[in-house]
Image (cartoon, rainbow, N blue to C red):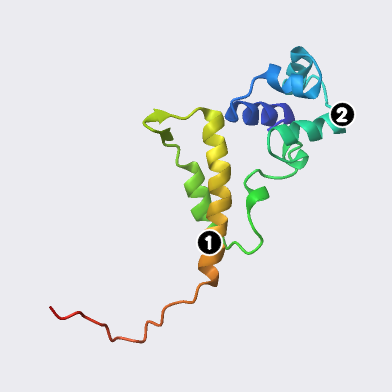
Amino acid sequence: MAMGARIKQLRTQRGLTQQEIAEQLGMGRSNFGHIENDRVVPTSEDLQKIADILHTTADYLLGRRDAFAEHVPDWATAKDKRDFKKMLEEDGEVMFDGVPMSQGDRQRVMDVLTGLFWEAKQMNKRAPKPDITDKTTDHAEG
């Protein structure tokens, strides 16, 4: 995927317009549109600003790194990665108080869930495992 397509994909996922990003960059909408259409290569400074606005890295925008990979902790196993990817790929509608969330709000929720997922996985790996050799159980007599 080309850099402009990555920028556009993330921009739309976050519910931002070209105009909103262009204003944050201090340029006109058409100039930003040229970046998205790969007609203009942004300066390294603008590329970093775009990455910051879109909550990603310049490496991802340049195609040097997968977006999924930038959130995966070093300790994650192959199964952990499959679990996480499955969670992210479920594309059901996200609702709040019975009202569908905007794409930008949904992305923010997914960003928070990403952090919580890896935190829970790590805590689970540290938790002591139950001793399955103890076959006694306590039953309340009633």
Q: How many marks?
A: 2
Left or right, 97 with respect to 71, comes to left
The residue beneath circle 1 is 121
Residue 93 visible (yes or no): no
Name the quadrant containing residue 122. bottom right
Left or right, 141 with respect to 6, comes to left
Q: Is residue 92 above or below residue 123?
A: above
- Percent across and percent down for residue 43 are 87, 29
Q: Are marks 1 and 2 in contact (CB under 8 Å)?
A: no
- Percent across and percent down for residue 116 are 54, 53
Left or right, 105 with respect to 91, comes to right
Q: Residue furthest left?
A: 142
Q: CA distance from mark 1 to mark 2?
A: 39 Å
Judging depth in this view, the residue of 97 and 92 nearest the camera is 97
Judging depth in this view, the residue of 55 and 40 nearest the camera is 55
Decide: few, some or many residues near mark 1? Use Cα within 10 Å; few <14, some 14-19, many ≥20: some
The residue beneath circle 2 is 43
Residue drawn at (36%, 86%) of the image: 133
Please tell me whether mark 1 or mark 2 is closer to you in this view: 1
Residue drawn at (34%, 87%) of the image: 134
Placement of the C terminus among the 4 image quadrants: bottom left
- Percent across and percent down for residue 35 are 77, 22
Q: Residue furthest front?
A: 142
Q: Earlier in the sequence, mark 1 or mark 2?
A: 2
Q: Judging from the image, what secondary structure is the residue with disc 2 in?
A: loop
Decide: few, some or many residues near mark 2? Use Cα within 10 Å; few <14, some 14-19, many ≥20: few
Residue drawn at (48%, 48%) of the image: 86
Judging depth in this view, the residue of 31 and 115 nearest the camera is 115
The residue under label 2 is which amino acid type? Thr
